[in-house]
Image (cartoon, coloured by chain):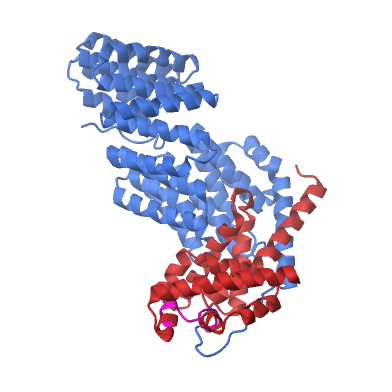
Chain colours: A blue, B red
Amino acid sequence: MRKHGKVIPLRLRRPTPQRLAQFGDAARQLQQERDTAANVVERLLRDTPRERWHELAPRPELQSCGALERLGNFATQALGRDPRQALSAAQLAVAVAEGLPPGLYQPVVVAQLCALAYKDLGKALLYLGRFDEALKALDQAEALLAPHGALMHDVAIVQLVRAATLQEVHRYEEAFAVLASAKKIFRNHSDAKRVFICGIAEGVLLHRLRRYREARETYLILLAGTSNSADHESIAALHLAIGYCSVELTDFNVAEEHLSRAIEMFHALGQPLQAAKAELGRGRMFVRRGDLDRGIAHLYPIRADFLRNSLTEEAGLCGLEIVEAHLVRGSAAQAEALAREIVGEFMAASLNRRAISALGYLAEAIAARKVSRELVTDVREYILSLRTSPEREFTFR
Amino acid sequence: MNSPTTARAADHSFEAIYEQYFPLLAQIAVCKFHVPDADAEALVHDVLMGYLRKSEDIVELRPWLIGAICYASRHYWRLNGRTMGAEAEMMGDRVDPASLRILDSLPDQLAAREALECLKPRYREILHMRYFEGCTVAEVASRLGVKTKYAQKLITKCLRRAERLYSQKGRAR
């Protein structure tokens, strides 16, 4: 309270020995737990069938912050590879966190552990396309953090997942608002990395909404902010994104400038496959510009490059650019043949069956000569969206 | 796996961080947000406990901790039923860096007091109003009979002057 007229003595506040000792003990305990959990969690998960992971929750070796961190890391790493496995790991983490013996940690730490377990659960559910359940898990995470003002940084981390989930259920305005809130919190914590991630997420959301000009603006602002940083990978990724937006905006000179820069930077970084993605952008640019033969000639070697590196999905997406070019040129037979070829590649690689169905639908539509350029775009965007929502249904315009 | 020696060194560094930042964070909670002493210490402890698990993820520790204590302090008042004024809310979003520098650079109370005593009376009075009586910038302006913007300028000027004097004192000691 402000006390006018009354002098509040200025004095330095030192931590009490008890608090300092408590903190030191917590630091030591965490270190020990991390060391102990290093092999235990992976071994337990490896030795137990996934359907029975939930039975592991009461195991004494999992009742620690270190074990929960390992479970969280496991769930995160499994997301791209096998979202169901990620879900099982996250469910186990939630069960462990909720059953931690009382008094083992201070309330603020327990809230942090439980909330992050729910956040991982939400993320796994998001990847599985179970959006309502994901949102409920994220609500739970935020409710656990709510009584602890010191954990706002964790709240913002949960909000990042919420924003990704909201856009999947087409609640775009809410997604923007949540991203803005998270960005503010990260900025106030000087967490430049996550402020950058929020910016990228905003750009991706705008891109998804086909608001290419705003998306490009967002990326350009981020690029201006990172121009002096040493993170060349992020800068190259931004050039790539600006290039892609510029292609959509038919702003081909700008697209060429940024895509060329991205290609140059990815090569310098020793990332030829990322450079190939930027080359794919240039191929798309040629097609959009009406330079169809050049576009097709440019895209075939990139597709072959992806296939050589077993990047079947990337090769398929690149192939769809060629299919589009063939269709615009009036070569429906070639377009159909290539579409079927892509279906075969996806099946051989056992990729998402929904992607295979969408591609099959496209091939049939070409065969029936009932296809538009937009359908190819829809299929391409659908396949891309399956990366974050593998269970999403295909809807076409 | 870390060796016991490395682990011990890490523990000591955590304790050193605790000791180093506790005064600054407590000062922010108390002076900027007027959180009562005992509660401020609990908030700082929570902030540092929250940091512990994420230590490897935090690049800039000092601003991260300052951000966290600002959020914790505002949350404290929300829970305790006091709505903070617009100015305090604004302060929480972007804490006045000049005042933080001063607070951060107070290794002992005496040097700060001496520095304040060496200031011109008018400067001393302004800092007294702002940081000892807890007046808002608008209140300082009204008591001085100047505009708020000018009062903010004066406060910053006084802080810089105090900081310079304080540095000189520090070096002399």
In this rendering, the answer to whether B121 lies above or below B164 is below
Q: Residue at x 60, y 66 (%)?
A: B46
Left or right: where does residue B126 sit relative to residue A316? right
Q: Is residue A122 visible?
A: no
- State which quadrant residue A360 falls in: top left
Q: Is residue A64 visible?
A: yes
Q: Residue at x 38, y 33 (%)?
A: A241
Q: How many marks?
A: 0
Q: Residue at x 66, y 80 (%)?
A: B113
Quadrant into which the C terminus of chain A falls = top left
- State which quadrant residue B44 falls in: bottom right
Q: Position of residue A125 (x, y in %)?
A: 44, 44
Q: Residue at x 67, y 62 (%)?
A: A104
Which is the main secondary structure of the residues drawn in magenta?
helix
Q: Tell me if residue A345 is in the magenta stretch.
A: no
Q: Position of residue A83 (x, y in %)?
A: 48, 37
Q: Position of residue A369 (x, y in %)?
A: 17, 15
The part of the chain drawn in magenta is B128-139
